[in-house]
Image (cartoon, rainbow, N blue to C red):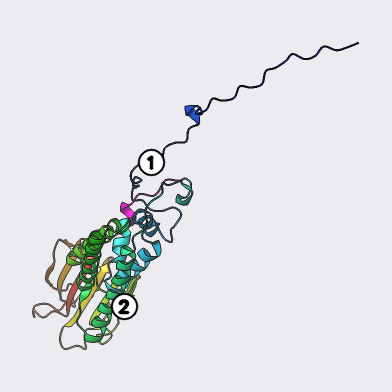
């Protein structure tokens, strides 16, 4: 007994020469032109404190370490690095949650320009030289001297980047640095930023000889309590100068003391013995033991504050 053979199936027809696959399987054409630049945001992946340096690095192409070193240098030599960093922290939005930037497929770009990195390195060298000149010669350049020198170096880097036009990132990063330095320079011109200690400070001298002629703090609240100073010994007024960069200043004086006060504050309110918006004046003591009528103050206070409120009251 024989079984029936299966039906004959013809072989598949060969594709004609020059046939193309369906359009749906064609590879996508490469993007034309430079890849669009993202928004300036604080980084979620490369951050030590707030992600500001990491965000600047992702936006400009300059290594985040150089941004951090630059911020530390401005803080040490000019006193404004902390303020600029805090403003950027407040103004820059945080990057959205998602895959890290390295995992996102990006279009190929041209070679990175060495001009921004070299400019920042020269900037740090120049700041170091200016600091040495300031310390060794006593020139007292102040924040404007440091920031002006830094802005000059960045301007020279912009000129070099514009003339050479090598690679990418030669202008964007330097322009960002120039804007930050310009803002810091404008801030230092209107706000007093001394190079003092960082952190809250409280002083309570008990004798006239223990009162220091100068109290200063760079960043933090400053309290100078003079309310318990014995005023029977000194023959003349006690002059005290108080300087604060960013933070509130609180000064207390004895109830019976006549006080002459001069206040120069940049951003903040001044309150002198419950009087608002007063920057100077003579305030006689109160109480049965008050020294009044001689027009001779027991305390002469000069207060300079950059950012924060100032209050002078009686203890």
**Mark seen at residue 204:** 2
- Tell me the element at label 2: loop
Q: Mark 1 highlights which residue?
A: 31
Specify whether residue 255 is in view.
no
202 sits left or right of 14 in the view: left
Dot 1 lies on which element? loop
Could you say which is closer to the camera, residue 8 or residue 64? Answer: 8
Q: Which circle marks residue 314 in the picture?
A: none
Name the quarter where the N terminus is drawn: top right
Q: Quadrant of residue 166?
A: bottom left
Q: CA distance from mark 1 to mark 2?
A: 69 Å
Question: Looking at the picture, does residue 206 appear above or below residue 1?
Answer: below
Specify start and end residues of the magenta stretch as a single range. 89-97
Judge depth for marks 1 and 2 and give the one in front: 1
| Residue 194 coordinates in the image, percent (x, y) | 25, 73
Binning the other alpha carbons within 10 Å of mark 1 as few (below 14), some (14 to 19) or many (20 upward) gives few
């Amino acid at each position: 007994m024989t079984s029936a053979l299966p039906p004959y199936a013809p072989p598949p027809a060969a594709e004609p020469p020059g046939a193309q696959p369906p359009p749906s399987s064609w590879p996508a054409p490469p993007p034309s032109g430079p890849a669009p630049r993202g928004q300036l945001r604080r980084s979620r992946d490369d951050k030590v404190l707030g992600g500001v340096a990491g965000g600047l690095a992702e936006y400009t192409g300059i290594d985040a370490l150089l941004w951090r070193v630059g911020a530390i240098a401005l803080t040490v030599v000019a006193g404004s690095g902390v303020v600029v960093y805090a403003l950027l922290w407040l103004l820059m939005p945080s990057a959205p949650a998602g895959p890290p930037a390295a995992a996102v497929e990006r279009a190929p770009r041209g070679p990175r320009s060495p001009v921004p990195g070299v400019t920042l390195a020269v900037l740090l060298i120049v700041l170091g030289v200016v600091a040495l000149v300031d310390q060794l010669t006593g020139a007292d350049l102040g924040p404007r001297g440091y920031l002006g020198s830094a802005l000059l170096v960045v301007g020279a880097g912009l000129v070099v980047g514009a003339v050479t036009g090598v690679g990418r990132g030669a202008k964007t990063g330097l322009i960002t640095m120039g804007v930050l330095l310009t803002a810091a320079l404008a801030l230092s011109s209107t706000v007093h930023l001394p190079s003092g200690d960082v952190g809250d400070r409280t002083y309570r001298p008990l004798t006239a000889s223990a009162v220091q002629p100068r109290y200063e703090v760079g960043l933090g609240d400053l309290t100078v309590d003079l309310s318990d100073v014995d005023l029977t010994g000194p023959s003349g007024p006690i002059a005290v100068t108080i300087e604060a960069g960013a933070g509130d200043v609180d000064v207390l004086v004895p109830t019976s003391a006549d006080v002459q006060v001069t206040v120069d504050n940049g951003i903040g309110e001044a309150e002198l013995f419950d009087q608002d918006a007063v920057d100077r004046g003579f305030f006689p003591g109160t109480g049965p033991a008050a020294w009044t009528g001689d027009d001779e103050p027991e305390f002469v206070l000069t207060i300079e504050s950059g950012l924060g409120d100032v209050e002078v009251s009686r203890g």
